Image (cartoon, coloured by chain):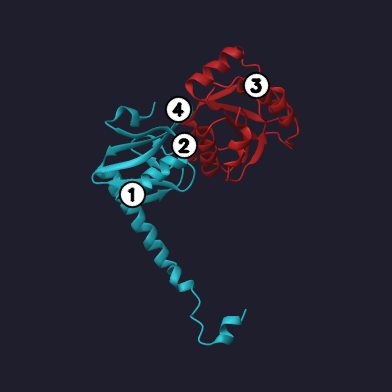
Amino acid sequence: MSCVEQMKYKLYLERTSFKDAREYIEKNSEEVYYVDPGYKIFKDYYIIGVPPVAMGVRGKEMLFTYVKPCHGTFVMGIDSEEEIARLRQREEEKIKASLKKGGPKAKEKPAPSSFSDIWKK
Amino acid sequence: MTEGKKALLVMGCPEVPVQMSIVLYLSHKLCKAGYDVTVAGTDAAVKLLKVSDPESYYVQKTIDLDQLIADIVEKKTDFDLCFTFMHSDAGMTYGATFSAISKAKLYAVVFGKNAEELAETIDYPAEKIVAKATHNPNPLKNKIDKVVL
């Protein structure tokens, strides 16, 4: 049994599909972050899911998917400022890394200055 | 050459009868082909397996599913082949997780009443082995036999 089940949690969706659980988090969170399957939260829970796995923040509460082989997917909410801070920190680091690489704008082609530019391959 | 190669069988919820017989069959087949086989599952699934194979003739190594995921994420272990058994959305979700965390070649073994519909929801890289089988294991066994190991 994961440590998550021994914590004080709220269940927002029970025994649903992973797709529905992801949509619930996306629609009902103030902030949404995406992590890969295997992302570790709390002491010993590794997130199970189909990428992209949505993690939500609503006030002090973190919303996440919890999958049990025989019972389907649950949307759980647990108050955790530490885990929320970790999600935000991770997002900041992703943005910084992207900027260091030159960012998406650096790869964009300059806007065409004439019609002949548009048809150039 | 399969000598020294590692194969993983990931059991889903054990409520559909064909799963256990195919896990034992596939484990035996892989062992005979020279693979080092490990079977993972929930506590209930592993108990069913151990009662079915009391002297560990077909399956020598078992591991708890949550522990296995932790070990792969922490890079303590990994496999060359991974067969994930699924008959529900939760099983499909576990398959997606193994596809993301493991370097193993992934096979999605899809069975149960809604096997075809469930197989269509798999959009991660996996070779699909699909049979609408619940009580009779032969349709799934025949598909397994066609897989080149």
Of marks 2 and 3, the one in the foreground: 2
The residue sitting at 41% across, 67% down in the picture is A100
State the residue in front, A60 or A102: A60
Secondary structure under badge 1?
A: helix
Q: Which residue is mark 2?
A: A17
Residue at the spot of label 4: A71
In this rendering, the count of numbered labels is 4
Q: Which residue is mark 3?
A: B24
Spot the cyan chain and give its letter.
Answer: A
Left or right of A61 on screen, residue A50: right
Q: Earlier in the sequence, mark 2 or mark 4?
A: 2
Distance from disc 2 to disc 3, alpha carbons, whole Å, reads 29 Å
Q: Kindly report the distance in space between the C-alpha atoms of the residues bearing marks 3 and 1.
A: 42 Å
Q: Secondary structure at mark 3?
A: helix
Residue B64 in the image: x percent, y percent? 49, 26
Tell me the number on the disc at residue A87. 1
The residue marked by circle 1 belongs to what chain?
Answer: A
Residue at 66% from the left image edge and 34% from the top image edge: B130
Residue B85 percent across, percent down from the top left: 59, 30
Instruction: Report whether A52 appears left or right of B37.
Output: left
Distance in Å between CA atoms under marks 2 and 4: 10 Å
Give the label, 4 or 3, closer to the camera.
4
> Which of the two marks, 1 or 2, is nearer to us in this view?
2
Residue A60: image location, x then y, percent: 23, 44
What is the secondary structure assignment of the residue under circle 2? loop
Label 4 SS: loop
Q: Residues within 10 Å of mark 1 (few under 14, many from 20)?
A: many
CA–CA distance between discs 4 and 3?
Answer: 24 Å
Query: What amino acid is labelled 4 in the image?
Result: His
